[in-house]
Amino acid sequence: MKRQAFTIILSITMIYSTAQVVESIGIKGGISFANQTWEYKSPDFSNKMDYKTGFYSVLTANFLKTKYLSLTTDLGFVQKGFQEEIPMTSEEFPDYISSYKTFKSTINYLTFSPKLNVSYNFDKLITFVFTGPRIDLQTSYKTDYLTNNFSEFNATVWGLTYGGGIEYRVKAIGILLEFSGYPDFTAIKKEEATETSAGLKITSQSYTISTGIKYYISK
């Protein structure tokens, strides 16, 4: 009985303490735009794929708020990948391009990003910019190619998040519009050139445009 009472009191204390630190919680969702660059070592050339759209959704929290600075954490899912237009020929006319077919490849990531947020209030309108490190964990992939080496891609990718946006706040509710960029520090795949391999480095670049809603715990 004493142990249960102690657990309840401790839980209430932790919730109360967290509420004093956390300023707001919310959810954001939108569209991702991603591509990949495939750089070969031997021969030396690179192939930059076309941008592909995907889905983006995260839970977000702001805490340790001061007048202009706060910390923000985002945790959720983002779709990356690329698409490529491949010329199609026929057996009857192998030298003639009859059409083009778009091949799409999607890589799903669990993404986590703590960021330093700088904001300025214009009454109910809030403008903000942010930057911070990011880690992406690959969860699954899907591709239109019959053969692929996506299973050899690094499951963990480190990178940077940067961006900005605007928010309109009415009492305890905030509605926001946000743009983010996601350059990677580590390659998705990297192999050295050998007698049997051309050597390949694959890097990714992506962006998101999202809207969201926030609830302010600290009034």
Image (cartoon, helix red, strand yellow):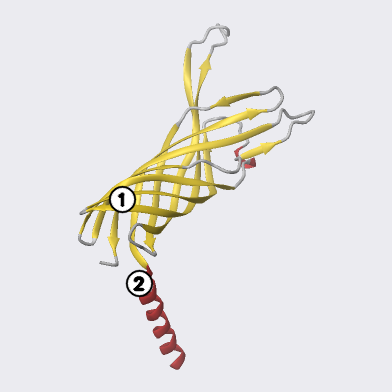
Relative to 10, does residue 167 appear above or below in the rendering? above
Relative to 26, does residue 10 appear above or below in the rendering? below
Q: Which residue lies at the image location 78% right of the left edge and 31% below the top edge?
A: 194
Q: Which of 188 and 67 is in front in this view?
A: 67
Neighbour tally class for label 2: few under 14, some 14-19, many 20 plus, Cα within 10 Å? few
Secondary element at image label 2: helix
Question: Badge 2 is on which residue?
Answer: 20
Secondary element at image label 1: strand
Relative to 191, does residue 61 appear above or below in the rendering? below
On the question of residue 210 being in view, the answer is: yes
Q: Which amino acid does label 2 sit on?
A: Gln
Q: In this view, which residue lies farthest toward the front? A: 67
Q: Which residue lies at the image location 70% right of the left edge and 36% below the top edge?
A: 191
Q: What residue type is labelled 1?
A: Gly
User: On the rendered structure, is 73 left or right of 122?
Assistant: right
Neighbour tally class for label 1: few under 14, some 14-19, many 20 plus, Cα within 10 Å? some
Query: Which image quadrant: the C terminus?
Result: bottom left
Q: Distance between the residues labelled 2 and 1?
A: 23 Å
Residue 52, x across and y down, in percent:
44, 32
